[in-house]
Amino acid sequence: VDHNMSKADALKKANQLEGSLKGKPFLAGDVPGPEDAKAFNELLGEDNMAIARWAKHIASFTGAQRKAFTAAAAPPAKAGKPAGEAKPAAKGVAVPQGDKKGQLISIQKEMQKQWDEKKIFEVDPPKPGEEDTGKFLVTFPYPYMNGRLHL
């Protein structure tokens, strides 16, 4: 890694690499080769795996989401709470604010609310004003080799 490389040079090198990778997973085609290792090492450094992991995580956000990261800083935390403290989420699980898991949990809660309101997963639910017939469905997951994953 050239630690004295300017930002413009680094961006130029990254753009060249991006162009070379268009339409293929590796520089030589379908399998990694020596030119992939060389390009990786020149761009990120041979032992900088945290940077590679970080880049993978940041790349998982859309361009619009990444732009939102640079928006005005969040208001200061309330007295007594450290900045960035996790907020409680579903069933007592602490999820850091802005975390993708937190976004998924909020989507899950909204969908479950819609399912409850529309009775989507009820078999022959009583219509408004009708008396409940008492019918119900029971399922039981019998244990098997990887059963704990499903229980």
Image (spheres, helix red, strand yellow):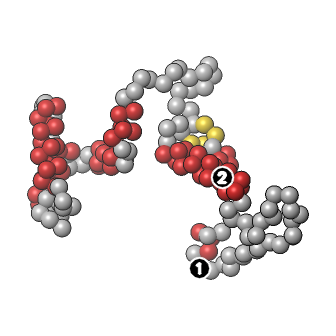
Residue neighbourhood size for the residue with mark 2, other residues' Cα within 10 Å, grouped as few (<14), some (14–19), many (≥20): few
Q: Residue at x 26, y 46 (%)?
A: 48
Give residue 27's quadrant in the image.
bottom left
Q: Residue at x 53, y 20 (%)?
A: 76
Residue neighbourhood size for the residue with mark 1, other residues' Cα within 10 Å, grouped as few (<14), some (14–19), many (≥20): few
- Image spot of residue 28 (x, y percent): 11, 63
Kindly identify which numbered label has been placed on residue 145: 1
Amino acid at the residue labelled 1: Met
- Image spot of residue 101 (x, y percent): 52, 48
Could you tell me which quadrant the N terminus lies in?
top left
Q: Nearer the viewer, mark 1 or mark 2?
A: 2
Kindly identify which numbered label has been placed on residue 114: 2
Give residue 129's quadrant in the image.
bottom right
Amino acid at the residue labelled 2: Gln
125 or 22, nearer to the observer:
125
SS label for mark 2? helix
- Image spot of residue 18 (x, y percent): 17, 49
- Image spot of residue 125 (x, y percent): 77, 65
Whether residue 132 is situated above or below residue 21 in the rendered picture: below
Report whether 95 appears left or right of 35. Answer: right
SS label for mark 1? loop
Residue 37 seen in render: no
61 or 50, nearer to the observer:
61
